Image (cartoon, rainbow, N blue to C red):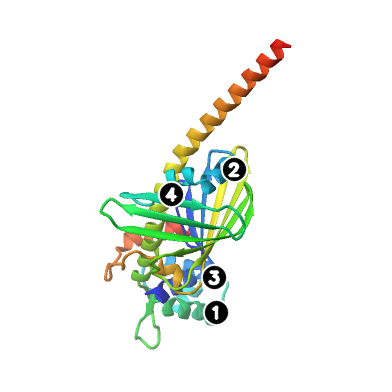
């Protein structure tokens, strides 16, 4: 598995359509579940990269209920997404569909978030399974620079870090 | 591009293929040379090489006899860049969440302290 790890965040691929992201938090899982499901809390952290603010966060926390997120950039750009909850186990598990307004990729995704607590630390594992083969990559915001040749030094480091 | 990245990730999902790439970082090698460190037949290694070649992660020399394999860095760089971008965005979110959780824990603590004090007072009155 190709895994990128810096600090405590781990991201890797799983199968050919999914990404798995794992992060540990120094808090009980009830707080993490709240931070994921209470709009006033979600808005505080799910802001995205620098320059973006979460301007809309609506959550109808029930199976079949929908959620809606919107972000606004300081330069005026907007971005929105939403979905429907499919499974809710309080403090343990959330499964929801995910679809962006201006979809850069075909279809949507299913996002499963699992909260596991041990010794006061909660591990949050998020699995994003995209609808199609093309989609995982389609999340790309901007085209990658082509023709960027990696120095072999950097590549060696990369292999050592990712695959050791 | 989408398919390219997908192919790259699939090709990297196997430990033997990652080991082959790690070996090729040191320089080009023939199938025979690549097969040596593994308890695998040359045809089995060749199969892995075909996957890596299709993913554009390696290229094969023209020398009909030896056909040395060499590493092609570009697809790997793209796969890594993709993950890097994704990671950065989430790491920023999660750092904010860390701070928020500290705040919530402190609030929780204060809430509990107030309840305990109220309980004590109730008990004292009795």
Q: CA distance from mark 3 to mark 2?
A: 44 Å
Do the residues indicated by labels 1 and 4 lie within the same chain of the protein? no
**Residue with the mark numbered 3:** B38
Q: Which mark is residue B100?
A: none
Circle 4 sits on which residue? A46
Tags 3 and 2 on a common chain: no
Query: Mark 3 against mark 4, which lies toward the viewer?
Result: 4
Are the residues flagged by discs 1 and 3 in contact, CB closer than 8 Å? Answer: no
> Which numbered disc covers residue A29?
2
Element at badge 4? loop
For disc 1, the chain is: B
| Element at label 1 | helix
For label 3, the crowd category at 10 Å Cα-Cα, with few meaning under 14, some 14 to 19 and many 20 or more, is few
Do marks 3 and 4 share a chain?
no
Q: Residues within 10 Å of mark 4 (few under 14, many from 20)?
A: many
Q: Which mark is residue B44?
A: 1
Nearer the observer: mark 2 or 4; the answer is 4
């Amino acid at each position: 598995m190709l895994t990128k790890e810096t600090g405590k965040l781990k991201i890797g691929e799983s199968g050919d359509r999914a990404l798995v992201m794992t992060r540990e938090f120094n808090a009980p899982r009830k707080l993490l579940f709240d931070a994921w499901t209470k709009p006033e809390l979600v808005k505080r952290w799910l802001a995205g990269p620098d320059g973006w603010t979460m301007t809309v966060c609506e959550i109808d926390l029930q199976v079949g209920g929908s959620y809606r997120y919107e972000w606004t950039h300081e330069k005026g750009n907007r971005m929105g997404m939403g979905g429907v909850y499919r499974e809710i186990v309080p403090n343990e598990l959330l499964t929801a569909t995910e679809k962006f307004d201006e979809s850069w990729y075909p279809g949507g995704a299913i996002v499963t978030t699992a909260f596991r607590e041990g010794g006061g630390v909660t591990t949050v594992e998020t699995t994003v399974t995209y609808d199609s083969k093309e989609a995982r990559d389609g999340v790309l915001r901007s085209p990658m620079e082509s023709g960027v040749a990696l120095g072999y030094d950097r590549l060696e480091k990369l292999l050592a870090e990712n695959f050791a | 591009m989408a398919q390219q990245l997908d192919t790259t990730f699939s090709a990297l999902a196997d430990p033997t293929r990652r080991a082959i790439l790690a070996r090729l970082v040191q320089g080009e090698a023939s199938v025979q040379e690549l097969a040596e460190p593994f308890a695998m037949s040359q045809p089995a290694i060749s199969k892995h090489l075909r996957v890596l070649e299709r993913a554009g992660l390696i290229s094969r020399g023209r020398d009909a006899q030896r056909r040395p394999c060499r590493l092609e860095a570009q697809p790997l760089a793209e796969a890594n860049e993709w993950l890097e971008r994704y990671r950065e965005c989430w790491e920023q979110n999660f750092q904010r969440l860390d701070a928020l959780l500290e705040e919530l824990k402190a609030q929780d603590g204060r809430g509990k302290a107030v309840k305990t004090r109220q309980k004590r007072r109730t008990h004292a009155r009795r």
